[in-house]
Amino acid sequence: MFKDQKVSYSGVQPSGNLTIGNYLGAIRNFSEYSEQYKTFYCVVDQHAITVRQVPAELRRRTYETLALYMACGLDPEKNTLYVQSMVHEHAELAWILNCFTMFGELSRMTQFKDKSAKHADNINAGLFTYPTLMAADILLYQTDVVPVGIDQKQHVELCRDIAERFNQLYPGTFTVPQPIIAKHGMKIMSLADPTKKMSKSDENPNAVVYILDDRDSIIRKFKRAVTDSGSEIRYDEEKPGVSNLMTVYSCFTGKTLEEIEREFAGCGYGDFKLAVGEVTADALAPVQNRFAELLADKAYLEAQMKKGAEEASWYARRTLAKVQKKLGFVQL
Ligand code: AQP
């Protein structure tokens, strides 16, 4: 066993421009583990092709996502940052895990149901088996914790079931991982329809605040955000619009919902929306500045991609060889 430390693993698809949902629900929380865990953070480009991508855009966003990881505070000297398709063991283990995953389990995944409804003309097998590739991503590194937004919790739970099933047949193969859901920012909702998750692939750009949006766009989008009837700034599940804005404000300021209610007592939605836009723009400005510097140096990004892939492969090879041996594949 190669582990002398606990392991944290997570990934983001380069399937669109990254949103404040991706930032607050996932990336911002990754660096919490950098000091005490061995950490692997992946740009999961193989997952992205379950939905049709324009090749030049996929390539560009792969660089951008890696640069954003670093701009959000992930130091490549302390974290293994890499691109999924550069480590072939992910796809190989995914095939093996497909043989230990039940059709019924995959059919129950809500993301599969949502994405097949959204892409009815392209319900491909990869969309269906997406969770087994995700299980391979996680299990290859003998992961202990997976920091994700709540929408991915079901997939991590399936990964646990697959690992436990495999371990029952072949004891001691995989560490069984735990999903870690950030208390705040677990699900940021669309600004156009606050009953729907904010998603990078949303066709309505006003529904989504991107990490790289400029200050004016951020403020304009929040000003236009759909809110509920009434005018009080109060967290209430029956009022998903204002509650979503309060979650965003709380994530960026660290204030509790009660503190926010007190701060905006007597104010209307207009004042509050402006304040949410301003704190978001302020918080994202340093990330955007660092991102611009990193993106200007393509050679540096490529060197980091190569280093990350080499590091990740070292670990991935060991787990895959162990699995192959347990299954009875001949190893020369
Ligand atoms: N709205 C959100 N609120 C909180 N967390 C979120 N995440 C995504 N949206 C929100 C978290 O971001 C991480 C990376 O997500 P992903 O790229 O693997 O795919 P996703 O969950 O399908 O994200 P999107 O933005 O909705 O992408 P598309 O539109 O391509 O499907 C995950 O940890 C996720 O929980």
Image: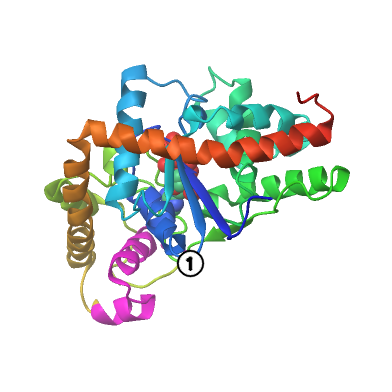
- Would you identify the image quadrant in which residue 304 lies? top left
Ligand 1 has an atom within 8 Å of the beta carbon of the residue at disc 1: no
> From the viewer's perspective, is residue 275 above or below residue 298?
below
Residue 20 in picture, x, y percent from top left? 33, 51
Disc 1 packing (10 Å; few <14; some 14–19; many ≥20): few
Between 78 and 129, the one nearer to me in the picture: 78
Q: Which amino acid type is shown beneath numbered disc 1?
A: Lys
Relative to the observer, which residue lies in front, 141 or 317?
317
Q: Position of residue 136 (x, y in %)?
A: 63, 38
Residue furthest right in the image: 169
> Which residue is at 45% across, 30% downward?
45
Q: Residue at x 16, y 49 (%)?
A: 289
Residue 219 visible? The answer is yes
Secondary structure under the numbered disc 1 in the rendered image = loop
> Which residue is painted at 86% across and 48% down in the image?
168
Is 214 positioned to the left or the right of 301 in the image? left
Query: Disc 1 designates what residue?
Result: 183
Magenta stretch, main secondary structure class: helix
Residue 23's place in the image compared with 183, above or below, is: above
Task: Return the x and y of residue 36 as percentages of the image width and height.
Answer: 49, 65
The answer to whether 130 appears left or right of 25 in the picture is: right
Say if the magenta span includes residue 245: yes
Q: Which residues are magenta?
A: 237-263
Q: Position of residue 32 (x, y in %)?
A: 43, 63
Residue 204 in view (yes/no): no
Q: Is residue 194 left or right of residue 323?
A: left
